[in-house]
Image (cartoon, rainbow, N blue to C red):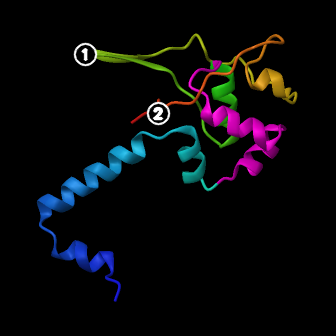
Amino acid sequence: MATNFKEVKKKMTPERRARIDARVKKAIASMALDELREARRLTQAQLAQTMKVDQGSISKIERRTDMYISTLRNFIQAMGGDLRIQAIFADGSVEISQFEEAEIDEEPIGQAEMMGVKSIGATYTAPSKRRVVPER
């Protein structure tokens, strides 16, 4: 017979519940793009439709480890968010404003432009475990 997690959690010590809650918060605070999209309950096809590209382009973006800031910004905006770039130092942090858009372009983004391809023969960077960390 399956056990209800709420029942199991009630039997845990407060310290153990606190450790579990901290791990959950940490996991939520750091997600790869595909995990973020899934957490927002969006499919690649839905996001592709919003961005006016094909589903394969979304898959490629999610696997990339290096991309233009504008590509990442467009991806985040298509999910309903805003991208902020922040430099964090021991004595504080500062938001980098140089990459902010003056206004949002209403023109559809071409697939090659969205992927950050500026010329024929551009190379594709293989995926890794690098993660985009949202603001805490």
Badge count: 2
79 sits left or right of 129 in the view: right
Identified by mark 1, the residue type is Ala
Where the C terminus falls, by quadrant?
Answer: top left
Q: Main secondary structure of the magenta part?
A: helix
- State which region is magenta: 42-68
Q: Which residue is tagged 1? A: 90
Task: Look at the numbered discs 1 and 2 and tell me whether their residues touch, using CB distance below 8 Å.
Answer: no
86 sits left or right of 19 in the view: right
Above or below for 7 versus 15: below
> Residue 76: horizontal and vertical position, in percent?
63, 35
Name the foreground residue: 24 vs 105.
Answer: 24
Q: Residue furthest bottom?
A: 1
* Residue 35 colored in magenta in the image: no
- Name the amino acid, label 2: Lys
Q: Is residue 13 left or right of residue 98?
A: left
